[in-house]
Amino acid sequence: MEINRITVFCGSSYGTERIYEEQALQLGKKLAAENIELVYGGANVGLMGKVADGVINNKGRAIGVLPHFLKDKEIAHKNLTELILVETMHQRKKKMDELSDGVIALPGGFGTLEELFEMLTWAQLGLHKKPIAVLNVNGFFDELLLFMKTMVKKGFLKQINFDMLIVSGNIPGLLEKMKNYKAPDVGKWIRKDNV
C-alpha cells in the first residue's frame, strides 16, 4: 500500500515520561526521511508540536488542521507547510481523514482516544480501508489493548476487527506494517450464532 500522508493523533501535553516526547520527535523525523507528509491537529504544544517539529526540522511537509476556536487560543504551529482552519472538531477529523492514507496514534488523553476509535469505527463499518496504528511507546497502550481483547472475549468486537489495529513499539516496524496492511472484507455486525 502506498502511503504519502499519515494523520497522527497525539497528546497536547508531554506526559510524565521523556520518552513520549523523544518518540514523537523521532516519528516526525522518520516521516520526513520517508517523504511521508504529516497531517495532524495543527498545534505547537505537547506531543503534537514535537511530531510537527520532527517533520519540519528535517525538511518534511506538515499540514495542520485546526478549529478556529483553538487558533484563537494562540496554539497554532507557526512553521507549518499548510494550516487548514475548520469550524468544528468533527470537521477537523473529517478533513484529516480526507487528506491522509493512514493513521498513527501516539500517547495522549481523551481526544487522542476519541480520534483513534472514530477512525477504527469508520474502518469497521467499511467507510475507509486505511491502516490504523498505535505507536505503543513504553507500553503506553497495553491496558487499552487488554480491554479491547475483553471486548472480543465478551462478544462485542470481532477478532478480525480487533486485528485491524496495527501495534508496534518501534517506528520503522510500525510503518512497515502499515505499508503491508490489507483491510478485512467482513461486515461489522456480530450475530449471536457467531459469538
Image: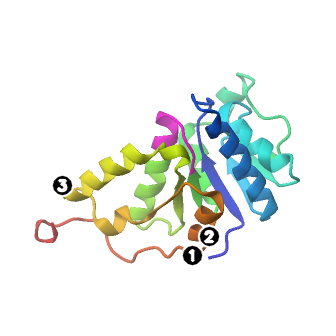
The amino acid at mark 3 is Lys
The amino acid at mark 2 is Glu
Percent coordinates x, y for residue 101 in the rendering: 63, 65
> For the N terminus, which image quadrant?
bottom right
In the picture of the structure, the residue carrying the numbered disc 2 is 176
In the image, residue 73 sits, relative to residue 21, either above or below, namely above
In the image, residue 29 sits, relative to residue 16, either above or below, namely below
Look at the image and give the residue range highlighted in magenta.
Answer: 105-114
Crowd tier of the residue under label 1, counting other residues whose Cα lies within 10 Å: few below 14, some 14–19, many 20 or above: few
Q: Secondary structure at mark 1?
A: loop
Q: CA distance from mark 2 to mark 3?
A: 31 Å
Q: Secondary structure at mark 3?
A: loop
Say if mark 3 contacts mark 1, CB within 8 Å.
no
Give yes or no for residue 110 being in the magenta stretch.
Answer: yes
Circle number at residue 118 = none
Crowd tier of the residue under label 2, counting other residues whose Cα lies within 10 Å: few below 14, some 14–19, many 20 or above: few
The amino acid at mark 1 is Asn
Circle number at residue 180 = 1
Most distant residue in the top direction: 73
In the picture of the structure, the residue carrying the numbered disc 3 is 154
